[in-house]
Image (tube, grey):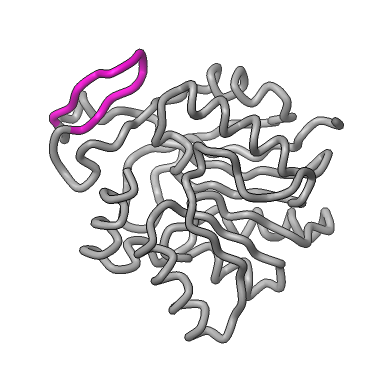
Amino acid sequence: MREQWDKIFKEQGKVFIEPHPKIPEVIELFKKRGIKRVLDLGCGSGRHLVYLAKQGFKVHGIDIAKSGIKFAKKWLKEEKLKANLKIGNIFKKLPYKNDFFDALISIRVINHGKIKEIRKLIQEIERVLKSEGLIFIATIKSSRKKEGLWKYKVIEPRTIIPLSGEEKGLPHYYFNRQLIRKEFKNFKIDDIWVDFKDSRSHAPHYVFLGELKKK
C-alpha cells in the first residue's frame, strides 16, 4: 500500500490542492468549541494541514506516503507555516498519546482498508481524542462499478480492489449511513449527508461530523 500511494503522489504532485468545500464550516465550529490541537488523518500532500495552520490551529498530520509528506513539508515551508508530521500506517497503532487531540479530520482515507482494519482505526481515533472531541470525516459512497469506471475484484463484503487505474491494488470499503452509525457508535452524529464536490474528484462521498461521547 505504501508503494502505491508514494507512486500516486510522485506522479501527480500534490494531487489535491483545494480543501474539502465543507472545511470552512468545520473550522468555524472548531473555533466556537475552542479546539486547539487537530490531527489530519491521512494528510496526503497537505491541503488541510496548510488551511488549518493558517487558521492558527496546532496541526498534526500522518500519512503512509513519504512523497506526500515531502510535498506537505515543502508546501508548509513555502507558506511559512508549521505542522507536526509523521509517516505511518493509520491502520496500525497511532503514534500519539491518549486524549491528545481536540479534533480530528480525515477526508476519503479511512475507507482504504478492510473492515477489521477500519474498526481498529476507529478504536485508535477514540483513544487519541479527548472526551467530547470532534471528528469530521468523508468516506467514499459507491464502488463506481455501476458506472463501469473500474475493473475490480471483490475481496470481502462491501470491499473491492481495483484492477486498473491510479488506485489499482488499494482496498476500498463502502459504507452506507447505517454502517457509519454502527461503526462510529461511540460518537454523537446528528446528520450524514452526500457530497459530490472535492477538488479533482466528483465521486459521491458521505460526510459527517461527530462528537466523541464522554469517556
Quick one: 105 or 1, which is closer to the camera?
1
Name the side, left or right, on which 117 lies relative to 143.
right
Quick one: 207 or 170, which is closer to the camera?
170
Q: Quadrant of residue 84?
A: bottom right
Q: Which residue range is magenta in the image?
A: 151-162
Name the side, left or right, on which 162 lies relative to 77.
left
Name the side, left or right, on which 137 lies relative to 58.
left
The answer to whether one can see residue 20 in this image is no
Q: Position of residue 95 (x, y in %)?
A: 62, 49
Q: Position of residue 159 (x, y in %)?
A: 34, 22
Instruction: Please name the residue shown 67% across and 59% down the image.
Output: 27
Q: Please say if 142 is above or below 211.
A: above
Q: Position of residue 170 (x, y in %)?
A: 29, 37
Instruction: Please name the residue shown 34% across and 28% down the image.
Output: 142
Q: Is residue 161 magenta?
A: yes
Q: Main secondary structure of the magenta part?
A: strand
Q: Quadrant of residue 151?
A: top left
The answer to whether one can see residue 210 in this image is yes
